[in-house]
Amino acid sequence: MKQPLRLTVNGQPTEALVSPGTSLLTFLRETCGLTGPKRGCEEGECGCCAVLLDGKLVDSCLIFALEAEGAEVLTVEGLRGDAAGRPDHLAPVQQAFAEAGASQCGFCMPGMLLATASLLERNPAPGDDEIRRAISGNLCRCTGYTPIVKAIRLAAALKRQG
Amino acid sequence: MHDVTYHAPTSLAEALRLLGNDPAHTRPLAGGTDLHLQMERGGNAWRHVVDLKRIAELAGIARNPDGGYTIGALTLAAEVESHVDLAADYPALAQGAACIGGPPIRNRATLGGNVCNASPAADSSPPLLALGARAVVAGAEGTRELPLADLWRGPRQTTLAPGELLTALRLPPPPVRGGSAFTRLTRSAMDIALVNAAAQVALDAQGHIAQAALALGAVAPVVLLVPQAAEAVRGRAWSAELAAEVARLASAAAQPIDDIRASADYRREMAGVLAARAMAQAVERARAAGGVATAGTSGAAGKSDKAGATGKATARQRPGRRGAP
Ligand code: FES
Ligand code: FES
């Protein structure tokens, strides 16, 4: 039987009836139409489905949508607006990844961007070691990670400049 | 899956009542990082899922009056890993918690969930066992406390009665001139441990080992204490010979299996190596804590430190097949 769910998704108050077995990932993709979070492994290995749940980086494939009752969810779609507050511009984190050429196929990017956002929230000037640890739950099959680490360094610098 | 009902009680009493209604078909839910996979793979008869995350009394790390700690079962691995006092008093546990999956897993996985999932390879289990943790269990009949080792019956099996819940883990006060360490062997950062080990030691004023504990994971149906090793080191100064003896006793205590990750022989060999490294690093930390001079006796410890005795060092030094860099 479906059960009621109320939460905030990318700042938008959202209400729905969902089956208890529905994952947060499926809810976001199929009910909210947000395809930023990707369905990779569905086992908590790849981090392609990662979102911020009340500010914490989590794998949405390992969470029932109903567990997010009352929570604030941020998907990559909610990462927008530059430092000057212009909503149709890329966020500094996204700008940095674009400038560093850190994306190839792009499948890991939503998770990588949110992992970066959550890292920089906690630590505005991370070292390479901290950067690598922060993305250790996000797999990238294309880049070899070096350009991603570079992008995160750049994102930190851009964010500090404001 | 369609006939499952999700419950989110806000008190322990309510959770116990829900669990007691239909214990055979009711599954408590902590972080869910293991439960989700079990649900997906099917073969279960769960009709009710009771989410414990809204029960405030089950979460958090508290200092006991005696200097020990009570860690709520629903405390996140990420919180255990980053709790400053706990990490200072019990570095083995912080190291173990830091090895559970990647950050998105540790932001969700709980210490109680890791324990109750009863995987012989769980990374928080050898530290908890070596540190002398006790399990606090609540049920309809009230609360009981037992040594952690008595909570595990076999792989993925606990001794909890239907309707009972692990509510907290209790750690004794850290010993004077004490130190602890965790070591782990994997192919990559995100992988399950092939073997893991944790040790705790306390030194006397002369720098001899007054008391020790050693626990091994992934080499038996449940995480094991190795009392023979603890016995062997008591009253002695740490040395290369003693490290070799600890390794031999740990290998002898291991009863590993062959599986997709490693052969039994390899696991048995590595159990010895990791046990000696864990003990060496625990001794090193105990010396640092107690201001005991290391000159002349640091050979064994120094060597194993270079070999990467810290938990995550293995992963960092050997970028794996799938792990991030
Ligand atoms: S899809 Fe969730 S971790 Fe891979
Ligand atoms: S860019 Fe293809 S997976 Fe990362």
Image: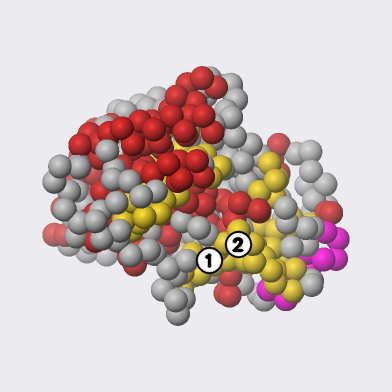
Structural crowding at the residue carrying mark 2, measured as other residues with C-alpha within 10 Å and reported as few (<14), some (14–19) or many (≥20): many
Q: Which residue is mark 2?
A: B135
Whether the residue carrying mark 2 lies under 8 Å from ligand 1 is answered with no
- Residue drawn at 50 percent across, 69 percent down: B70
Question: What chain does mark 1 sit on?
Answer: B
Could you tell me the amino acid type at mark 1?
Arg
Extreme-bottom residue of the structure: B65
Residue B80 image offset from top left, x and y in percent: 43, 60
Q: Is residue B16 magenta?
A: yes
Residue kind at label 2, given as amino acid type: Ala
Identify which residue, B151 or B275, lies in the foreground.
B275
Kindly identify the residue that appears in the image at 57 percent across and 28 percent down.
B256
Magenta stretch, residue numbers:
B12-23
Evaluate if marks 1 and 2 touch, with contact meaning CB atoms under 8 Å apart.
yes
Residue A14 shows in this picture: no
The image quadrant of residue B160 is: bottom right
- Considering the numbered disc 2 on the image, is that residue within a helix, a strand or a loop? strand
